[in-house]
Image (cartoon, rainbow, N blue to C red):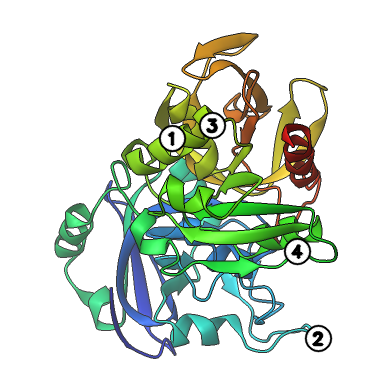
Amino acid sequence: MTVIGSSVSQPAVLVLEDGRMLAGDAYGAVGTTFGEAVFSTAMTGYQETLTDPSYHRQVVVMTAPHVGNTGMNTEDEESGRIWVAGYVVRDPARIASNWRAQRTLDHDLNDQGIVGISGIDTRALTRHLRDRGAMRVGIFSGDAAREDATALLAQVHASPVMAGADLTADVTTTQPYVVPAIGERRFRVAAVDLGIKAMTPHRMAQRGMEVHVVPAQTSADDIRALGVDGVFFSNGPGDPATADDAVALMSQFLSDRIPVFGICFGNQIMGRALGLSTYKLRFGHRGINQPVKDLATGRVAITAHNHGFAVDAPRGGVFDSAFGKAQVSHVCLNDDVVEGLRCVDVPAFSVQYHPEAAAGPHDSAGLFEDFATLMSGVR
């Protein structure tokens, strides 16, 4: 990524790898950026999206037309920085109007060097991505937007693809840290950071869990030495087919019958540990309005998603794995994608969505209590 200054009155062009180009105005930092073009259907929570490490190397297109109305604040950040590779909006807010706002969105985009584009038809772009699938994209603003179209497209084609990308090392914490339990400590949990969001250990802490967030490369012996009651595997970016180390780590805890809970990337890791394969979705699930059905109860929850890969698992009944019987526990009602797995013979389960749900909805917050119940049962 190159950044060369302010976005005031600067032209910008978005170039997809299939050759489609859209002209607009620079938004955020001015320069050049590349990533995978994906769209989010959320109407709110843009700050949580921007600071979610799972969006590393992705250019996010917002389907909601107005973005930036509520500004930015420190409290709602899901990590210490903006992770998206680029940002695409139709109508950026001219002012921030919220009592909690500390800064404007364009201030933070500029301050952190995030190249974006505004003034384009983001819903038409979303329709295009739904038809053609997620693909590489470049945003060029300022002087870069005036370059020859053929040269711009060549740069997009030279950028890396998401399939086969191993990005965990880019996002995991470099040092372990502890999020204390709120109130009485009921459990001690190790959270393997594959790109964790700040709200996730907070939700566990609210339920009496002392959460030890550890780097992805932490050994099973070092985690056991913490004396944990359970192990959590977080969300994160990249292709789960590359995550052999995380799969091996989870497999050790499944063998030990230590309670395991995974979300998002952690669900894909569990799928692979159970002997299943993963695959890339055509355009993925991103947003906070995705309907998911619990196959055991029939209950439908509206859930928060951010995943471009999924687990390929058999529906209906149980299947055999290296750790005994397992089953698909949840599916997405939009496209029947697997949204959860549950082990029958070992204390482990996972979901593909985000029960911490910053910035909502909170239909699935009880899954953290399910984790507590699982740890209580093993105790």
Q: Quadrant of residue 340?
A: top right
Circle 3: element type: helix
Circle 2: element type: loop
Q: Is residue 193 visible?
A: yes
> Which of these two is toward me, 233 or 301?
233
Q: Position of residue 203 (x, y in %)?
A: 74, 58
Q: Residues within 10 Å of mark 3 (few under 14, many from 20)?
A: few
Q: Residue at x 45, y 67 (%)?
A: 83
Amino acid, disc 1: Arg
Residue named by callout 3: 256
Amino acid, disc 4: Ala
Image depth: mark 1 or mark 4 in front: 4
Amino acid, disc 2: Trp
Q: Is residue 80 above or below residue 298?
A: below
Q: Quadrant of residue 318?
A: top right
Q: Is residue 257 above or below residue 110?
A: above
> Which of these two is toward me, 82 or 115?
82
First in sequence: mark 4 vs mark 2: 2
| Left or right of residue 31: residue 200 | right
First in sequence: mark 3 vs mark 1: 3
Q: Indicate which disc residue 99 carries.
A: 2
Residue named by callout 1: 282
First in sequence: mark 1 vs mark 4: 4
Residue named by callout 4: 181
Image depth: mark 4 or mark 2 in front: 4
Q: Position of residue 68 (x, y in %)?
A: 64, 76
